[in-house]
Amino acid sequence: SASMKGYLTIASDIEDAILDAVAHRVPRISALVISDYAKGVLTPRLLQELLRMAKSASVPSFVDPKGPDLSPVSYTHLT
C-alpha cells in the first residue's frame, strides 16, 4: 500500500473495483454513507468519485471524515 501523509492507502486498481461496484448500485440506493475510520480505503480520489456519482444520480451523500486531511473535498451533498 502507498502512503498518504503517514496513512496507508489502497492501490488504484482496488479504487477502480470499488468505484465500479458502487457505480452499478448508485441508481438503486436512497443515500450514500461513506466512512472508513482512517483505515486507508477512503482515498481522496475515491471520495471525490463517490461523491460525484452520488451527486450525478441525485443521491444524498454523507461522509464521516476520519484520517488524513481531506479538506479539499466538499463532503456532503443533499438534494
Image (cartoon, rainbow, N blue to C red):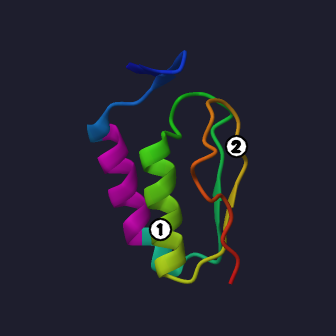
Q: Which residues are magenta?
A: 14-24
Classify mark 1: residues with Cα within 10 Å, few (<14), some (14-19) or many (20+).
some
Residue pictured at 63% horizontal, 38% vertical? 36
Q: CA distance from mark 2 to mark 1?
A: 16 Å
Looking at this view, name the residue that lies furthest to the left.
13
Disc on the earlier residue, 2 or 1: 1
Q: Which residue is mark 2?
A: 65
Between 43 and 18, the one nearer to me in the picture: 43
Image x and y of residue 20, in percent: 33, 59
Q: Amino acid at mark 1?
A: Arg
Image quadrant in which the N terminus is located: top left
Circle 2: element type: loop
Q: Which residue is mark 1?
A: 52
**Residue 70 counted in the magenta span:** no
Q: Quadrant of residue 76?
A: bottom right
| Total marks placed | 2
Image x and y of residue 41, in percent: 50, 35
Q: Amino acid at mark 2?
A: Pro
Looking at this view, name the residue that lies furthest to the front.
72
Above or below: residue 55 compared with residue 32: below
Residue pictured at 49% horizontal, 82% vertical? 57
